[in-house]
Image (cartoon, rainbow, N blue to C red):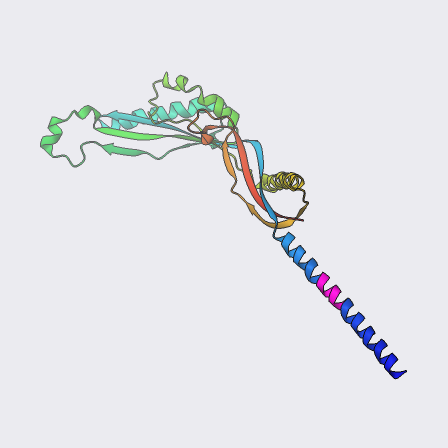
Amino acid sequence: MKISETFKNLSLIWVVVLAFGVALGGFFIGNGVYKSMARRTVTVKGLAEMDVVADTAVWNIKINRVGGDLSAVQASVDNDIQKTREFLTDNGFNENEIQNLRITVRDKFAGYSDAQRQDENASDRYVIETGVMVRSNSVNLVDTVSRKMGDLVRQGVTVSEDYAGPIYVFNGLNDIKIKMIEMATKNATAAGEQFAKDSGAKLGKIQSANQGLFTITARDQMDAWSDNEKQSINKRVRVVTTITFYLR
């Protein structure tokens, strides 16, 4: 009777040990599969683009005069500045949107000896450079009036040869950043889901994510070599996010 009970007890112990071993083995196998699956990832990029319009224009109208009499050259410059300001106000700008630029005076004979000065043409000795700056939120007005510069030149104003026209600035990037990141993330998630579907897997959680830099370019490029973003009212903001997903 005692031998039979001992045998039963031993059998029960072996059953418990065997069951525990099977359960433990299943845990390690399952855990191994989980870790193996966790190592399967896919990295995708998501693009977001948004067309925006510049909200500020900065327009420098540069003027220069050359002559042999400094006082006469300065008087001509003063006259040009007055005509330029009148031209701007007549075309719709407010006085508080207009300011004079700094004046620079260059003496071509500076450092010359008296003998050297006698050999030079004194009629173009002095060069005065200055101008007028317009800073306005009326970007369309700036664009329109900047195309009328011929009217100012016909009044005898000597616009500098390095005149490049207005530049246009977009200051609202912070207002659209969150929305664009959301758009880029959705785009990346869609790409990841398609990859997972094609590979017979399912898209898991995000392992890592990297937000790229925001870039602003001209919406309509003027040529194939440069985008002239600063001279374009219509701009395109772009961001690319890189996201790594687990596959399961």
Confirm whether the magenta stretch covers residue 22: yes
Tell me what residue is drawn at x 44 percent, y 28 percent. 166
Left or right, 103 with respect to 87, comes to left
Tell me what residue is drawn at x 42 percent, y 28 percent. 225
Q: Is residue 195 visible?
A: yes
Left or right, 27 with respect to 77, comes to right
Q: Total of numbered circles in the picture?
A: 0
x and y percentages locating residue 198 in the rendered image? 65, 39
Q: Is residue 54 visible?
A: no
Q: Quadrant of residue 148?
A: top left
x and y percentages locating residue 244 in the rendered image? 59, 47
Q: Which residues are magenta?
A: 20-26
Tell me what residue is drawn at x 78 percent, y 67 percent. 19
Observer-nearest of 33 and 179: 33
Left or right, 136 with respect to 30, comes to left
Residue extending farthest left? 115
x and y percentages locating residue 237 in the rendered image? 54, 35
Confirm whether the magenta stretch covers residue 227: no
Observer-nearest of 6 and 158: 6
Left or right, 67 with respect to 173, comes to left
Looking at the rendered image, the quarter that the N terminus falls into is bottom right
Q: Quadrant of residue 164?
A: top left
x and y percentages locating residue 44 in the rendered image? 58, 42
Residue extending farthest right? 1
Q: What secondary structure do most residues of the magenta stretch adopt?
A: helix
